[in-house]
Image: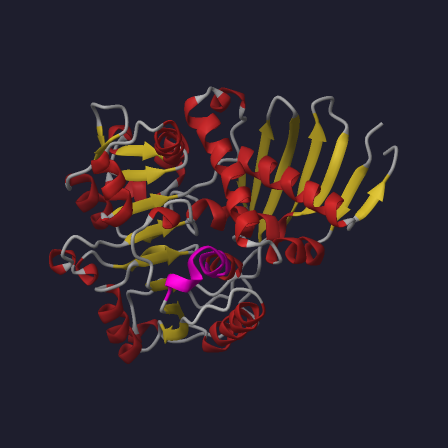
Amino acid sequence: MSALTILGNATIERLLLNLSKEEVIQFQKEIEDCLIDYSSKGERQYQPQPGIVNRSNNQKVLFRPFTSPNAVGIKIIVHPALNRAHADVPSRQTCPSIPESGNQQLPLNGVLILCDDQGIPTGLLNAKEITSYRTSLNALIPYVLRRKTSSIIVFGAGMQALWHIRLALALRGTETALITIVNRSEPRAQKLIQTLREDNDSRWNSTCEFGFLNSSSLEDSRRLQRQLSTADVIFCTLPSQQPLFSLASLKLEGRKEQYPLITAVGSWQANMIEVDPEILRYAANAEGICVDGKTPQTILVDDVDNALVHSGEIVQSGLGRMQMGEIGEILLQKRNGSMTKDMAAWLAQGLVVYKSIGVSVTDLAAGNAILALAKKMEVGTVVSQF
């Protein structure tokens, strides 16, 4: 009978935060392997569809089951009801383009349950840190392929933003000059910046500067427009219901062949949207890539089928399947050496939009990798003969 390992959130955070750059790269490779298997090696057919329950109080519950030849499991995530009692409510009249509501969004919580191929439980893990880490590591797959990552803008100041920045520093901190956090709550953003400075000083020693722009301030909104016009990377991590920035703010015509990478992970239902559909339509009509040698596909996603249903950006843009390419297909071409020079150049410096809805089996890979780390470091609570 297998032993069951129980891991709390604090233990998981320590394990992940103390990974070396080489270990982060290896962890990302395991996520990439899952995406390749899902897109190109038949694993898609063995993955059940996720379930979502929306309650009238705005609570959302996500159920993500997953399977592999060697393990099965499920992740349950609760997107809590909005808490107005403790909200800091600024006036949106000062910055109507920023979609954050007056309600305070509480942190996401949940659990990851893992079993072996015989159905014997092997892991019970707090999903909070795993979800943020796995999602961020997935979002940063095209980031590591970029030629330039000096200027980064991050929309949001929550767990996703924290892990996006931590991983960006761990992977390419020496190449980063400025990271700007855009959020309506200055105390929350400054707390995030303080955490990042402490993490950076004790681990990565990047010389980058951290900045904050208040999305409720007209003056900061003007500064944001200027920074968007030169940003190398834009990370979107908010469960927004309106676009966070416009196509015009990117000033693509004056970019001189160095366009931004835009990744979006915060919106995961059809009524949520972070990236302006006009940006997606622009990218889809620009000179793109050919994943299968014939069909131009210019919007990267991790799962085309789910993106067509659950990504507000994709739904509202009116784009179809033939205008998207799965990241797993791209990774396979990179691995087997069939990637063209044009595609490599586009991934390095073109206008790349990566919309990640999430592929459930990557939770399985992340969970098992963390269980292996816990065993190596001899942490967690082990229940024998469970």
Horizontal side of 197 relative to 317 (left or right) equals right
Measured along the vertical axis of the image, is residue 346 above or below residue 340? below
Measured along the vertical axis of the image, is residue 73 above or below residue 261? above
Judge by depth and name the residue closer to the eye, 169 or 6: 169
Q: x, y percentage for residue 129?
A: 61, 53
Query: On the image, which quarter does residue 142 sit in?
Result: top left
Query: On the image, which quarter does residue 63 sit in?
Result: top right
User: Would residue 364 be counted in the magenta stretch?
Assistant: no
Residue at 36 percent of width and 44 percent of height: 355
Measured along the vertical axis of the image, is residue 38 above or below residue 100? above
> The C terminus is located in which quarter?
top right
Q: Could one spot residue 109 in this view of the protein? A: no
Q: x, y percentage for residue 44?
A: 48, 24
Please give the range of residues in magenta: 165-176
Would you say the magenta stretch is mainly helix, strand or loop? helix
Q: Could one spot residue 251 in this view of the protein? A: yes
Residue at 32 percent of width and 78 percent of height: 217
Measured along the vertical axis of the image, is residue 138 above or below residue 323? below
> The N terminus is located in which quarter?
top right
